[in-house]
Image (spheres, rainbow, N blue to C red):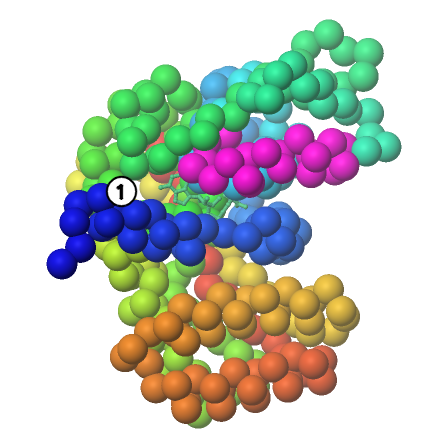
Amino acid sequence: MAGRGQLEILKRCYMEKDRFSLSWIKMRENYDIKSRSDLLQNQYKKDKSFFKNIIDLGSGNGSFLRYCHKKKLIFDKMVLLDYDPKLLRNFYATTYKYLGGSKYSLLKINPTRYELKKKDVIKAESIRLINANILESLDILDKYDLISLSAISDILPISFIKKFLNNIGKNKIIYLSICFDGDIKWHIKHRYDKYIISMFNRNQEADKGSGYAIGSKSIKLIKEYCIKNKYTVAIKDSSWRLNSYNDENKKFQRMYLDTIYRPLKNDNTTDKDMLLEWKKVKLKEIMAGKSKVTVGHKDILIET
Ligand SMILES: C[S@@+](CC[C@H](N)C(=O)[O-])C[C@H]1O[C@@H](n2cnc3c(N)ncnc32)[C@H](O)[C@@H]1O
């Protein structure tokens, strides 16, 4: 039998495996930017005061911050929090490149503090990186006016979502964008689509080291907790609509296919013959430029 120390190591290895590759995080940014609904922009038009002090939980390399910049959602301070130091470390290089040739510059004060400002303007947006686990960060959340979670609601444990929504203070905005809703629709149907999607959704709810993930039920459960707490909640579609017309889209669809195939390949309850045949056909359709798929996502904006 494994001792406590060995179990901790096994758990950590499992969590490591579950981390996101930088190439996937970078690749999905364009698709996420195009897919987000206008919920946050409408909130900004209605009341900018929520944009003073923002925290982005599970920030990756800062995709949400760049989205705010692109949409001219100006903030005073933004914290990017993630437990993966490799993604946080990439924030500077990616954002610097993104701003290249524009009127904005990104100043590195130290490895965790940055300033983003328009050239010839004194006021800057200040940015801080925190390398921490969201599950251990509940205590700090009340300091922020706007709490953002992007492409992460389905991988967090149900217990965390419940505690977070039940304990957060009044008069906050919580913006959960690109929440996977479990619905994947291929334009060209395959007889195993239904089976693979159901196995994938089941697999997504497995314990990845920090408790059972909420999975595709996240949207329904979040809405229920909001109603129970008498928060105002708005939900809009933010699905990816992917085609395979050019090399970039082909590459992204192949990567997406892999995010379904990889966990199922290691799942004892999935029929491997069906999985392999399904993957082969999907890959062929992508390479032929014929594959189109809609990956169901929703944006949720909560006012507590
Ligand atoms: C699908 S990625 C989304 C990244 C980013 N929000 C974006 O939209 O590009 C999920 C992110 O959540 C982070 N993450 C997952 N669980 C976490 C946890 N318990 N604590 C901190 N970060 C976590 C991962 O490292 C990864 O960066």
Camera-nearest residue between 157 and 292: 157
Magenta highlight on residue 93: yes
Q: How far across and how far down the image is residue 266, in percent? A: 37, 72
| Point 69% across, 81% down: residue | 287
Q: Does label 1 point to a residue whose CB lies under 8 Å from ligand 1?
A: no
Check the image and report above or below for 43 versus 48. Answer: below
Q: Amino acid at mark 1?
A: Ile
Question: x, y percentage for residue 113?
Answer: 58, 18
Does residue 135 appear left or right of residue 120 in this picture?
Answer: left
Q: Please state the extent of the stretch shown in magenta in the rendering.
A: 80-99
Task: Residue 102: name its quadrant.
Answer: top right
Image location of residue 219, percent across then percent down: 33, 53
Q: Is residue 197 above or below residue 191?
A: above
Q: Residue at x 34, y 24 (%)?
A: 141
Q: Quadrant of residue 246?
A: bottom right
Side (left or right) of 129 relative to 4: right
Residue with the most extreme top position: 122
Residue situated in front as seen by the camera: 236 or 204: 204
Q: Say what secondary structure mark 1 lies in.
A: helix
Name the residue: 40% across, 21% down.
144
Task: Say whether residue 226 is visible.
Answer: no
Task: Assign ligand 1 to one image quadrant.
Answer: top left
Q: Which quarter of the image is occupied by the C terminus?
A: top left
Circle 1 residue: 161
State whether residue 124 is above or below residue 241.
Answer: above
Task: Give the crowd class for mark 1: few <14, some 14-19, many >=20 residues within 10 Å.
Answer: some
Q: Quarter holding the N terminus?
A: bottom left
Q: Residue at x 41, y 50 (%)?
A: 16
Q: Is residue 171 above or below residue 57?
A: above
Magenta stretch mostly in which secondary structure?
A: helix
Residue extending farthest right: 101
Q: Is residue 45 magenta?
A: no
